[in-house]
Image: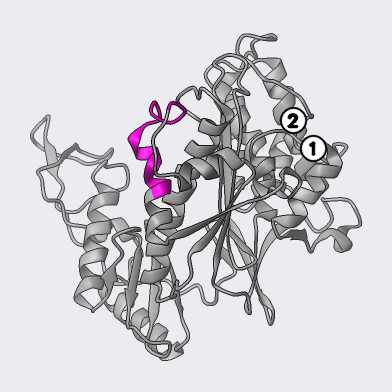
Amino acid sequence: MAHPPNGYHNAFLHRDLNEEVYMTMPPGFESEKPNQVCRLLRSLYGLKQSSRQWNAKLSTALVHDGFKQSTVDPSLFTKGDGKDNFIALLVYIDDILVTSANMELIQSLKKFLDTAFKIKDLGPLGYFLGIEAHRISDGLSLNQRKYALKILDEAGFLDSKPTNTPMVQGLKLVHNEGVPITDASMYRRLVGRLLYLTATRPDITFAVQQLSQYVDAPTDIHLFAAYRVLRYIKNSPGQELFYLTDSDLQLKAFSDSDWATCTETRKSVTGYCIFLGSSLISWRSKKKPTVSRSSSEAEYRVLAATVCEIQWLTYLLNDLKVPTTKPATLFCDNKSAVAIAENHVFHERTKHIDIDCHVVREKFTQGLIKLLSVTSENQLADGFTKPLPASSFNHFKSKLGTHDSYAPAYGGGCIEGYIPAK
């Protein structure tokens, strides 16, 4: 196939194919010989090789221009080592985000990419992959208000009655309870949309984690639980994460576990949240794949998962030229789990624990982390392991650093200034 004409904006057509790929003739193509096929010289949308080939093409061009590809996150490319000559580039397929304190470096990079691939310059960061970004003098806020309102509109919940929590306290969802819904794909699409909404909404992470366990055979009970999450989103669709410009660059983490909370498997639900200064940068809620014999073991296992995330974030910060001179502070509300990490002697309570979990002890010895006990009332990760009552949930949400700057504008409603899709 012919090369794309100059100025034709199609990232995938810039990729060369390393293997022989054939396709049937497109409709309307006339040929004297029947059953002919054409061989592709360039990739097209729909080919399973497309994304990888485009990424290889772009990565090669950036590395040739002096960029270094991160080993911990291959989508991150950096260049330079000082404040005035450092530039970072983040890639998601053919969407690119660039940041630097030196505007000349950004202009030079855009000129290089336009020469090589014919890019479309979207200007300063405002809307990226469904996430809205707003810069003010104090910092940067990220939200998915448009995306949240779109979810509410498509589900018919724009005029629903809002609720203060995403999940009823004490609710235990299980399989095969309730009436199976006729259109399971509708439930799956809704949960999929909610999963992407957790990119800026840590407050619904636990509820969505629970809902996602039943996409194989959802019932009306699971659907009603999902509808409650929508009613909660209706209460504050513009809730956002805020990142201060003058925040310190010290990692601080909280990890927690709800032991044997799953009534079907007796597995524990674990969660953690990690802050860079006062800004939340990583969080997770997950049901563990194995059964823990004690609450101490469950807490120790989530400590191991949190330490691995801290290690990854440390590598990422180093790639971004952010020094991490002090150990990351890791808070846990189980003193026995902290003692296991600090105690170098194996005994009856720990000999059955997998060896990989003892990464906590190793990183504690190396000085990467500093373990501290925290009371259950001050455990910020508590909301990632269980549904909380309204008062405790509001405290949990406020400590995550989220707020809703749109709340005064729409006076409690969510449809002002929003036009549903035709």
Picture coordinates of residue 328, whole percent (x, y): 51, 62
Residue identified by numbered label 2: 227
Dots 1 and 2: beta carbons under 8 Å? yes
Colour style of the rendered protein structure? one colour
The percent position of residue 38, horizontal first and vertical second, equals 13, 42
Side (left or right) of 250 relative to 240: left
User: Quick check: is 415 in the magenta stretch?
Assistant: no
Q: Determine crowd level at label 1: few under 14, some 14-19, many 20+ residues with C-alpha closer than 10 A.
A: many
Left/right of residue 381 with respect to residue 338 in the rendered view? right
- Tell me the residue at 42%/63% (across/down): 314
**Mark 2 packing: few (<14 Cα in 10 Å), some, or many (20+)?**
some
- Magenta stretch bounds: 348-361
- Using residue 108 as the reference point, say whether residue 421 is left or right of it: right
Looking at the rendering, which quadrant does residue 63 occupy?
A: bottom left
Position of 124 relative to 390 (above/below): below
Query: In this view of the protein, which residue sits in the foreground, 145 or 116?
Result: 145
Assign a secondary structure to mark 1: helix
Quarter of the image for the C terminus: give it. top right
Residue drawn at 69 percent across, 23 percent down: 223
Q: Which mark is residue 231?
A: 1
Amino acid carrying mark 2 in the image: Tyr
Residue 309 as seen in the image, left or right of residue 207: left
Q: Residue at x 41, y 83 (%)?
A: 106
Nearer-the-camera pick, 153 or 193:
193
